[in-house]
Image (cartoon, rainbow, N blue to C red):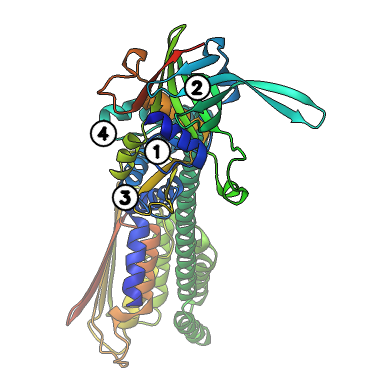
């Protein structure tokens, strides 16, 4: 379920199913970014979806050649071979490692739809358990949604209702990167050992096992 | 209705507590609008704004109630500046610490962060401190100007009263009567004529020149009264019983000029009249320590001008006004207008 939703985030940009916390602004600053070669490779997650992780290379411009910004290109394949592509940044905040997922708009969809889509960032904690296993835990939107609806959290956001389901409210964070980071550090700092704890309502966890 | 409104506004603007409350109520509303991203306010916005404002209230009130009166108003600018800056930096830091850490213990069910970095917080605090200081200084400036206006008005009243006193001092009736006396003496070639002229001259010289001073010696006022009484003898009945009792410790005791002569003149005008028998005036002047007491009593005359009574004269009111200006809250002025007796008792302390 989790991976499918990640893919749906990639397809529809602002997800129609509430699952992960989404933000218009990135959760990282350039100075926070790190690159760990241990993340490169092919992985299999709990839903048997395949993750292919390579360095992200982009073209700087006409005749300017290629470059990299120390981020990753993550391609996810589900059972139906749908591919979702993300530009992912590994970054460190207050001693803990995070991933920022930024969907890459492909050319799979109608251009008219594509121009209406606004890419949203999602954030996940990452723990390198071993050379062949990592734990990735996304921030659970239901947790944040509950706080918004009970009026117990103050952070810039917008409430949207999608065309598919006008009864359901979706929340998109519009806070600045600085504000997002303060919030994540203060309320999202769960110890690595408890990322997949069942009582942890803040994070939604998945494990990746290396294939090659 | 307008007068009630004006009174209400006056009372409110004079009440410091009310002004402070108004200032903070307005500030709270402005901050609420700044901190809330949308046009509708949520409960969380009220809570955040209220807590944020509490961190502002303390340094601003400290500045208004302690630093400004103790340091700025006493021109200890360096010390004031130091306290101003220390409270600015300290409370800015406290605000940041409160929302980063302490708020989780105070309100564990709510999720707040410090939404402004330290420099931005300092800007908030600086704006509030400066605006509140300027408002406070403006209020003091208005009050100072008001007091200055009152002083100017009082000064004007004093000058007006002194001018009136001066204009009453050279009583034209007295001058006219005295000149008539001198004329009578002169045409009869009376030997008292030169002496009468000299006494009149002394009186006029004193009234015109000496009475312009702020104070004169008590002995000079006594001499003036005696000269006046002597001059009046030429036009009053020999039966008139005039007694002037003086008991003073210090001849050079300083008093305001021309406080007594108008009372003596008043008694002569209304009491001693050429056509009334058994007339009397009794004067008593006592000076002891820093206190002077002057009493004068005269018979009530049969007035040919019933509309002018002795107690309603402009001269008495002028004396009263002058006493209020010169010896405020240090004098008594009693007038008793009985059936057969009129008396004035004046007492003042230096």
Q: Position of residue B83 (x, y in %)?
A: 46, 29
Which of the 4 quarters of the picture holds residue B317? bottom left
Above or below, A51 against B294 in this view is above
Calculate the distance from the C-alpha at mark 2 to the C-alpha at mark 3. Answer: 67 Å
Q: Nearer the viewer, mark 3 or mark 4?
A: 4
Residue under the point 45% across and 32% down: A6
Question: Disc 2 on helix, strand or loop?
Answer: strand
Position of residue B69 in the picture relative to residue B278 (left or right): right
Tell me if label 4 and label 1 are in contact, CB under 8 Å: no
Q: Which residue is mark 3?
A: B17
Above or below, B11 against A82 in this view is below
Which of marks 1 and 3 precedes in the sequence?
3
Regarding residue B237, the answer to whether it shows in the image is: no
Q: Nearer the viewer, mark 2 or mark 3?
A: 2
Q: Nearer the viewer, mark 3 or mark 1?
A: 1
Question: Disc 3 on helix, strand or loop?
Answer: helix
Which of the 4 quarters of the picture holds residue B15? bottom left
Tell me if label 3 and label 1 are in contact, CB under 8 Å: no
Question: Disc 4 on helix, strand or loop?
Answer: loop
- Quadrant where the N terminus of chain B sits is bottom left
Q: Position of residue B174 (x, y in %)?
A: 44, 80
Residue under the point 47% across and 49% down: B135
Q: Which residue is mark 2?
A: A51
- Same subunit, tags 4 and 1: yes
Q: Say which mark, if any, is on residue B56.
A: 1
Q: Which residue is mark 4?
A: B109
């Amino acid at each position: 379920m989790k991976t499918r939703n990640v893919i749906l985030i990639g397809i529809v940009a602002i997800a129609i199913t509430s699952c992960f916390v989404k933000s218009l602004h990135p959760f990282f600053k350039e100075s926070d970014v790190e690159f760990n070669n241990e993340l490169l490779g092919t992985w299999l997650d709990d839903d048997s979806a395949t993750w292919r992780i390579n360095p992200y290379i982009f073209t700087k411009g006409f005749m300017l050649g290629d470059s990299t910004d120390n981020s990753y290109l993550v391609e996810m394949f589900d059972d139906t071979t749908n591919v979702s592509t993300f530009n992912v940044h590994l970054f460190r905040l207050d001693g803990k490692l995070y991933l920022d997922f930024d969907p890459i708009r492909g050319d799979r969809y109608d251009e008219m739809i594509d121009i209406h889509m606004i890419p949203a960032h999602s954030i996940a904690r990452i723990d390198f358990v071993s050379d062949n296993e990592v734990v990735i835990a996304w921030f659970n939107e239901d947790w944040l949604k509950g706080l918004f609806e009970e009026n117990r959290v103050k952070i810039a956001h917008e409430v949207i209702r999608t065309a598919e389901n006008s009864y359901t409210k979706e929340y998109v964070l519009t806070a600045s990167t600085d504000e997002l980071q303060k919030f994540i550090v203060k309320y999202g700092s769960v110890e690595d050992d408890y990322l997949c704890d069942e009582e942890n309502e803040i994070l939604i966890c998945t494990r990746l096992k290396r294939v090659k | 209705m307008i007068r009630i409104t004006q009174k209400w506004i006056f009372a409110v603007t004079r009440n410091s507590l009310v002004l402070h409350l108004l200032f903070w109520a307005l500030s709270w509303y402005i901050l609420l609008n700044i901190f809330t991203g949308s046009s509708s306010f949520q409960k969380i916005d009220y809570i955040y704004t209220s807590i944020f404002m509490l961190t502002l209230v303390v340094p601003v009130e400290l500045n208004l109630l302690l630093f400004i009166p103790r340091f700025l108003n006493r021109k200890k600018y360096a010390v004031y500046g130091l306290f101003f800056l220390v409270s600015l930096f300290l409370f800015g830091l406290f605000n940041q610490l409160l929302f980063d850490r302490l708020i989780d213990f105070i309100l564990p069910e709510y999720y707040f962060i410090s939404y402004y970095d330290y420099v931005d917080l300092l800007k908030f605090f600086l704006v509030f401190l400066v605006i509140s200081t300027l408002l406070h200084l403006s209020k003091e400036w208005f009050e100072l100007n008001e007091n200055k206006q009152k002083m100017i008005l009082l000064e004007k009243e004093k000058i007006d009263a002194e001018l009136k006193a001066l204009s009453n001092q050279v009583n034209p009736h007295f001058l006219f009567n005295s000149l008539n006396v001198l004329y009578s003496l002169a045409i009869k070639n009376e030997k008292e004529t030169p002496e009468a002229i000299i006494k009149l001259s002394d009186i006029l010289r004193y009234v015109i020149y000496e009475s312009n001073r702020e104070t004169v010696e008590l002995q000079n006022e006594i001499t003036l009264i005696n000269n006046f009484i002597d001059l009046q003898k030429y036009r009053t009945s020999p039966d008139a019983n005039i007694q002037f009792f003086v008991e003073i410790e210090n001849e050079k005791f300083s008093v305001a000029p021309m406080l007594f002569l108008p009372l003596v003149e008043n008694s002569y005008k209304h009491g001693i009249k050429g056509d009334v028998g058994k007339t009397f005036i009794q004067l008593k002047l006592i000076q002891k320590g820093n206190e002077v007491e002057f009493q004068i009593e005269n018979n009530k005359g049969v007035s040919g001008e019933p509309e002018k009574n002795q107690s309603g004269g402009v001269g008495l009111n002028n004396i009263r006004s002058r006493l209020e200006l010169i010896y405020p809250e240090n004098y008594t002025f009693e007038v008793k207008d009985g059936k057969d007796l009129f008396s004035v008792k004046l007492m003042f302390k230096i």
